[in-house]
Amino acid sequence: MAPAPAVLDDSFLAHVRLACVPGIGGRLRRLLLDRFGSPQAVFNATPKEIASVGRIGPRLAALIPTLATNGVAEEVIDTCRRGRIEVVIEGGDRYPALLSRIDDPPGVLFVRGAIEPCDALAVAVVGSRHPSPYGKRIAWQLAGGLARAGYTVVSGLARGIDAAAHRGALDAGGRTIAVLGTGVLNIYPPENADLAAEVIGRGAVVSEAPPLAEGHAGAFPQRNRIVSGLTLGTLVVEAAERSGALITARLAGEQGREVFAVPGQVDCRTARGCHRLIRDGAKLVESVDDILEELGPLFETTTSADGRAVRSPAELQLDDIERRVLAAVDASGSPSSVDIDDVVAASGFSASQVLSTIGVLEMRRLLHRLPGSRVGRV
């Protein structure tokens, strides 16, 4: 884990300072940066210039320049040092690549634990705070299956389905990330403090709010864009018709991520949200395989928990022979295609083994055959 740097540069300090401005969420931050170019430039602007930005009221426009020297950011950074909290800045090497692709990424993430490269292979599991025993069992079961398949499980540490999802991943020996609507030193709900400690040991607890921040009505819907933004897809397990989990699912769709839902009993109130999602096109999930087969190529190559370079989530499900044949294709160095005879030579398997394995890799949408006995990556 890398805590806040010992020597603060102006850019780092300005990013943290902007994150501490009350009333500045992801969208307003993006509008300000689009107008002024950097956090430093925002604080150097006059109230009149700031007020010219859409959706910035006169009171907030007058407040922002006064915060340039109020010392709040320095206090927050000192708190992070003492609490061993990593401060991750958008655009930095430690910032999650998936999250950077959403329209309104947080400028700063405060992290207890560690976000690792393998966490790019992640699925969100969310749902009702008041689930049925069935819902809790299914969330635990599916989260455990995802963890055993090599995926990080992301959720919000809330009561009910969120807590069951974190527990399922932990019980399976996997990684999990909890995204809070409060600060990372202010765990909510308080009865999940012990669970949060376990999550920190096997993943991370993260928030865009300063470490000691209290929760407020808008913070929890706001954090949902981070839950979906950190992941390849969002799975909803039980949700009423007016549920924060449905906000997360909607955001996932807007971010170009997959949306999954578990069906429930037709007379169960907490099944209605999931049934609506399925009617609207979400993938119906009966087992973890329904999720795994739907996840497509990654935005960029990442590293799995066991250190392998991964270009598609489907690679996590390969056996040793399939992995070696795929590695032989990649080892050719050709960005487009390789002769199958070269794959046979590089893999050390017989031609019949390689051909049958290529067939499997085609079905997994990892390879495709080309004219002239050649094969290439999808």
Image (cartoon, helix red, strand yellow):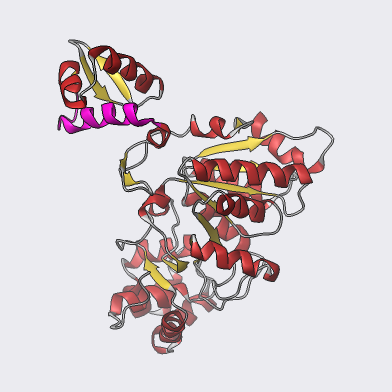
Q: Quadrant of residue 375?
A: top left
112 in relation to 64, above or below: above
Q: Residue at x 62, y 61 (%)?
A: 220
Residue at position x 46%, y 82% in the image: 76
Q: Is residue 173 above or below residue 57?
A: above
Q: For the C terminus, which image quadrant?
A: top left
Residue 101 shows up from this direction = no
Is residue 348 positioned above or below 122 on the image? above
> What quarter of the picture does the N terminus occupy?
bottom left
Q: Can you tell which quarter of the image residue 323 is in?
A: top left
Give the x, y percent position of residue 94: 34, 62
Left or right: 101 with respect to 190?
left
In depth, the one of 169 and 251 nearer the eye is 169
Q: Which residues are magenta?
A: 318-337
Q: Residue 139 at x, y = what percent?
A: 65, 45
Residue at 54% from the left image edge and 78% from the top image edge: 59
Q: Is residue 21 left or right of residue 355?
A: right
User: Image quarter for residue 34?
Assistant: bottom left
Q: What secondary structure prevails in the magenta region?
A: helix
